[in-house]
Amino acid sequence: MAPASGPRVLRSRLDGGPVAPLKIASGCDRRCSFCAIPGYRGAFLSRPPQDVLDEAQWLAGQGVRELLLVSENSTSYGKDLGNLRLLDELLPALAATPGIARIRVSYLQPAEMRPGLIEVMTTTPGVTPYFDLSFQHASGSVLRAMRRFGDRERFCALLDQIRQACPQAGVRSNFIVGFPGETAEDLAELERFLGEARLDAIGIFGYSDEDGTEAASLDGQLDQGEIARRADDLSDLAEEVMAQRAAERCGETVDVLIEEHAGEDLYVGRAAHQAPEVDGVTTVRSIAVLRPGDIIDAKVVASEGVDLVAEALVSTAAGTGMR
């Protein structure tokens, strides 16, 4: 629990690792036809910025180095408080928290991405240029049936904008296949997007009805066997795309948050484009002794599927390359 002095934060930690989630909002005002979240979590509600900053300070005091900002829709942060750019303001303030080395934002809505937010996420020291974008599909007709924004061309343009600002930016997304009415042409459009987008991490999910959602009553429901087949095929493509993207990073210098000692001179951690638990890991060889929570510069020398292998650029004598 929180100490007697300092920020009063009503939470406790389940482990002592160097990464912790930090909730910035709850609920959702979007009405995606497949999603039941608004029905049981209510309207979007932002936490006051000072509450978030106080909890970040408390977590830093617990040894946390990386904060993962979580909500149902992080790009909406502040809209109910009268400030549509509040996330742009919060991120630099969080990054200035003593002891915190990384701020990572989860669940960004492509329809709500704006140039100012991209600039903050790609230029602010301590804010990881990591974009967890909720694309869900790439066919315009399927996305309209989902009551969502976009299509392949607009999503590719958004990715171009991000990578022009930061070529090494990490991008992940999830996709639903087998949505009611999805045609072979729609599926081909999604496959084309996956081939063009060069995403670091991809989740593929077969559609299933959620009680009380509009999509459950739509025409064009697909057989569960067909949905499973499409999901399997897209998952194979996703694995290939992610492996190719990881291979492209060979030769890059990445900053790695060390999470565990793997034996002798080997350590396991995550580069900036790798979120906890879902995006793969980076195995680092280091002549210097490292500890969980250290952040080091390392050169990527190989890839194994979505995972990376790197050599630490850190000197035992000078301590350079370690933060």
Image: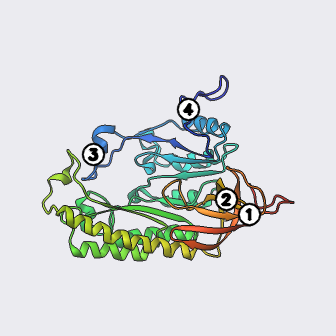
Q: Amino acid at mark 3?
A: Ala
The residue mark sitting in front, 3 or 2, is 2
Q: CA distance from mark 1 to mark 4?
A: 33 Å
Residue 243 x/y as whole percent: 49, 73
Task: Identify the residue at horizontal 44%, vertical 45% (top origin).
Answer: 71
Count of labels in the image: 4
Q: Quadrant of residue 20?
A: top right
Question: Looking at the image, is mark 3 or mark 4 earlier in the sequence?
Answer: 4
Q: Tag 4's secondary structure?
A: loop
Question: Looking at the image, is mark 1 or mark 3 earlier in the sequence?
Answer: 3
Q: Residues within 10 Å of mark 1 (few under 14, many from 20)?
A: many
Q: Residue furthest right?
A: 317
Task: Answer whether residue 42 is visible to the viewer in this image.
Answer: no
Q: Is residue 320 above or below residue 301?
A: above
Residue 277 x/y as whole percent: 51, 54
According to the picture, the residue beneath numbered tag 2 turns out to be: 267
Q: Is residue 248 above or below residue 264?
A: below
According to the picture, the residue beneath numbered tag 1 turns out to be: 286
Q: Amino acid at mark 1?
A: Ser
Q: Residues within 10 Å of mark 4 (few under 14, many from 20)?
A: few
Q: CA distance from mark 3 to mark 4?
A: 29 Å
Tag shown at residue 36: 3
According to the picture, the residue beneath numbered tag 4 turns out to be: 12
* CB under 8 Å between discs 1 and 2: yes
The residue mark sitting in front, 1 or 3, is 1
Front residue of this view, candidates 150 and 80: 150
Task: Answer whether residue 287 is visible to the viewer in this image.
Answer: yes
